[in-house]
């Protein structure tokens, strides 16, 4: 068993892989530990897989998993975790926004007796104001809604003990939100802070749509508050409908020449219809996740690997 396994998802990262490998190996060699690097090619369309083949040829510590198509960042991390052999495991991205040099501090903190040490972002360089604001709101919203304590301003960049990895392997859900699952597992957890640099090369694989999907996975996977909100909406609409019923009956008996207007009718119908659509959408999100687990398809499909 190696001292440390490093799991790195790859999606169109040909401009980052050589620099990442050089910086990683320099740091790890300086730590005087045994290690393995596990790269998961998540359906890249550039030369990423070709570069990984080259690294694996000259360095036996480099392992790769090549997916048959793009299965997503969280699934790629899960595939790497399924094959780690390290006493501890680091999860990090390949864009160098997770600085390899921070592994020294993470490992030192881990050696103090913590099973999970995550990197908390003090600042985020090279990101738009909108993305920073949306991320800030999401993490705080999830923290308030979740039944467990999920650390604020953190991604997947962290070091975890092999006991945590074993528990993750035993969690069968198909919709993965690893940072939430790790918080749910527990053990002794702490953090270190760092200033996140901008991406070294290439473009991010996380579009706004994918970020929204990840946010939904986090909320629906670790909170039932949206379902409770549906119940509250139902009570509010019921109360509103009851008041309107009393008003209509009173108007009917007190005004003989009452002419019913369409405005109040349309407002009522649209309001109730809107609430119903919101409720159906929220319930549908939870049903979709149940459906994914019930189908029990493989989490990912591997085309090639050197394990």
Image (cartoon, rainbow, N blue to C red):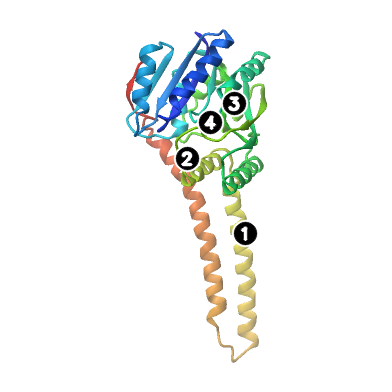
Is 207 placed above or below 281 here?
A: above
SS assignment at label 2: loop
Q: Is residue 124 left or right of residue 25?
A: right
Q: Nearer the viewer, residue 7 or 127?
A: 127
Q: Nearer the viewer, residue 107 or 237?
A: 107
SS assignment at label 3: helix
The residue pinned by badge 2 equals 206
Q: Which is more foreground, mark 2 or mark 1? A: 2
The residue pinned by badge 4 equals 178
Q: Which is more foreground, mark 2 or mark 3? A: 2
SS assignment at label 1: helix
Query: Disc 2 and disc 1: Cα gap in Å?
Result: 38 Å
Q: How crowded is mark 1: few (under 14 residues within 10 Å), some or many (20 or more)?
A: few
Query: Disc 2 and disc 3: Cα gap in Å?
Result: 26 Å
Residue 111 lies, in percent from the top left, at 65, 13
Query: Disc 1 and disc 3: Cα gap in Å?
Result: 35 Å
Q: Which is more foreground, mark 4 or mark 2? A: 2
Q: Earlier in the sequence, mark 1 or mark 3?
A: 3
The residue pinned by badge 1 equals 235
Query: Disc 4 and disc 2: Cα gap in Å?
Result: 16 Å
């Amino acid at each position: 068993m190696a001292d440390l396994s490093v799991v790195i998802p790859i999606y169109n990262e040909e401009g980052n892989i050589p620099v990442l490998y050089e910086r990683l190996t320099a740091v790890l060699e300086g730590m005087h530990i045994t290690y393995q690097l596990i790269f998961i090619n998540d359906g890249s369309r550039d030369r990423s897989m070709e570069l990984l083949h080259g690294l694996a040829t000259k360095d036996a510590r480099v392992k790769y998993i090549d997916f048959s198509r793009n299965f997503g960042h969280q699934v790629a991390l899960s595939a790497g975790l399924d094959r780690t052999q390290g006493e501890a495991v680091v999860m990090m991205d390949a864009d160098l926004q997770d600085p390899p040099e921070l592994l020294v501090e993470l490992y030192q903190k881990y050696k103090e007796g913590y099973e999970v040490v995550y990197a908390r972002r003090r600042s985020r360089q090279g990101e738009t104001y909108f993305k920073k604001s949306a991320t800030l709101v999401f993490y705080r919203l999830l923290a308030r809604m979740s039944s467990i304590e999920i650390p604020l301003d953190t991604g997947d960049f962290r070091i975890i003990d092999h006991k945590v990895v074993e528990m993750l392997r035993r969690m069968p859900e198909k919709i993965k939100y690893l940072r939430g699952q790790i918080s749910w597992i527990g053990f002794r957890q702490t953090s270190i802070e760092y200033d996140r640099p901008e991406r070294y090369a290439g473009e991010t694989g996380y579009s706004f749509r994918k970020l929204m999907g990840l946010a939904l996975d986090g909320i629906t996977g670790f909170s039932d508050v949206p379902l409770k909100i549906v119940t509250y909406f139902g009570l509010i609409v019921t109360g509103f409908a009851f008041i309107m019923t009393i008003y209509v009956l009173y108007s009917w008996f007190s005004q003989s020449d009452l002419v019913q207007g369409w405005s109040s009718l349309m407002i009522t119908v649209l309001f109730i219809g809107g609430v119903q659509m919101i409720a159906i959408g929220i319930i549908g999100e939870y049903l979709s996740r149940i459906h994914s687990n019930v189908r029990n398809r493989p989490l990912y499909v591997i085309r090639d690997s050197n394990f």
